Image: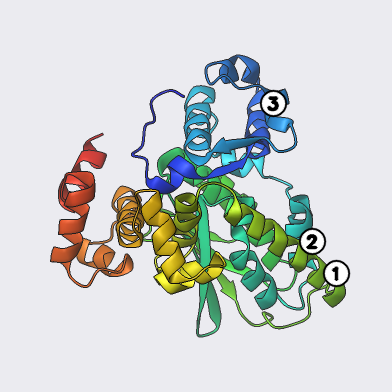
Amino acid sequence: MPEQKYKSSPITEVVRIPGKFLIRALNEASNAGFSTEDFLRQFDLGLAELKMPGSLILVSDFATVISRLIEESGIPALGLKARLGEQIADYGVYGTAMQCAASLRQALDFSIQYQDIIGPIVRLKYAQSGGELVMFAEEQGVSGAAALYELEHTFTIMLSLVNTVGSVERICFVHDDSGCGDLYREQFGCEVRFAQPRNEMWVSVEHIDDPMPQSDPEMFELCRRQCDATYRNLMQSGSLPEQVRRLMMSSSGIFPSEEKIAESLGMSARSLRRQLAAEGMAYRTMLDECRISLAQEYLNQSKHSIAEITDKVGYATVQSFSRAFKRITGETPGAYRESVQLG
C-alpha cells in the first residue's frame, strides 16, 4: 500500500473488514466518470476481488484507499453520496435484527453491542439527556477523509433507524463542512453543525420505547443469535493479541479488566497471562498501547485538552498519561498534536 497520510494505531494495523465496504464508494466515483479500475491498480486491488465472498482488507488499507479516492476523484461528501438511499435492510441479518427490535432503544442497544460486525472504524455509544438522546460517534484508528466517510455512513444508517419511530433534532461533526453544508442538511433533514467538539446525533426520546413498525420478537431473537455467532467468530479469528486488542478497542474508552477480557475469550485470567507471555506480550502493555492509540485519535481530530483526554483514556493524572504516551510514541502529547497539525 502507498504511504498513509495519517498516523496509524494498533487497531488499524491488525483488524480486517469486508472488501465489499469499498464497493459503494467506488461505484459512486465510477458514476461520476472516475476510472476506478485504473485507480485500484495502484493498490493491487480489483473490483472482482473486492466483491468476492470472504474478501477482507485491513482497516488501515481501507482508510488509505478511501482517502486517496476522495482526493483523486475530487468528489465532496463522498460517504454521504455513496450512502444515499441505503436502508437498514442492506445490512443483512444485522440490519434485520434492528428492524425487528421491540423498540428504538432495543435496536440501539443491539446495534452498539454488535457494531464490530460491520467494521470498527467508528464506534457508537449513547446517553439520555432530558427529553433527548444523544449518540456519540468516536473515530477509532483513522482520521481525516476516511473517518469522515465512515461518519457520514454511520449517521445515514442511524437516521434511517430513528426515522421509523422518531426524529433527529440535530447532527454535529468535528469536521468542517468543506462547502457541502447544504447537501448535509438536505440529506439529513435537520440542523447540521460543523467544527464541533464531538460527533453527535441528537434524537427526540418521546417514542424511544414505542413498538417499532416491524417489531418481531421471534425474528429479532433469531437474528440476534446469528449475529452473536458471527461476533464470536470475529473475536476468535487471528492471534490472541489481536483478539485482546479488539476487545479492548471495542470498549470506547471504558477499558475492561484482565478478568473480563479472559472471560470473553473463554479462559481464566491466569491462562490469558500465560498465553500472552508465550507470544512476548503482557496485558498491561497492550492496555497502555490501546489507551495511547485512542489518545492519538483524540489529539488528531478533537479539540479536547490534554487533561480531558487523560480522563477519557483512563489515566489518573496528566503526568502518568504523558509518561506513557512518550514511552510508546517517543514524543509528548503536545508535540504529537503539533506534528499532526503541521503535517
Q: Position of residue 79 (x, y in %)?
A: 58, 41
How many C-alpha atoms fall within 10 Å of the one at disc 2: few (<14), some, or many (≥20)? some
Instruction: Check the picture and name the quadrant holding the C terminus.
Output: top left
Q: Could you tell whether 6 is left or right of 82 in the image?
A: left
Q: Where is residue 51 in the image (x, y as percent from the top left)?
A: 73, 31
Pick whichever of labels 1 and 3 is earlier in the sequence. Answer: 3
Q: How far apart are marks 1 and 3 (CA)?
A: 33 Å
Q: Residue at x 69, y 64 (%)?
A: 228
Pick whichever of labels 1 and 2 is earlier in the sequence. Answer: 2
Q: Could you tell whether 75 is left or right of 187 in the image?
A: left
Seen from the viewer's position, the closer of residues 142 and 207 is: 142
Which residue matches tag 3?
49
Residues at marks 2 and 3 touching, judged by CB atoms closer than 8 Å: no
Which of the numbered marks, if any, corresponds to residue 219? Answer: 1
Residue 328 visible in the displayed image: yes
Which of the 4 quarters of the picture holds residue 266? bottom right
Q: Distance between the residues labelled 2 and 3?
A: 27 Å
| Count of labels in the image | 3
Front label number (2 vs 3): 3
Which of the numbered marks, if any, corresponds to residue 96? Answer: 2
Three-letter code, disc 3: Glu
Three-letter code, disc 2: Thr
Seen from the viewer's position, the closer of residues 157 and 270 is: 270
How many C-alpha atoms fall within 10 Å of the one at disc 1: few (<14), some, or many (≥20)? some
The secondary structure type at the circle numbered 2 is helix
Residues at marks 1 and 2 touching, judged by CB atoms closer than 8 Å: yes
Q: Where is residue 89 in the image (x, y as percent from the top left)?
A: 79, 55
Three-letter code, disc 1: Met
Q: Position of residue 283 (x, y in %)?
A: 36, 61
Q: Could you tell whether 231 is left or right of 218 in the image?
A: left
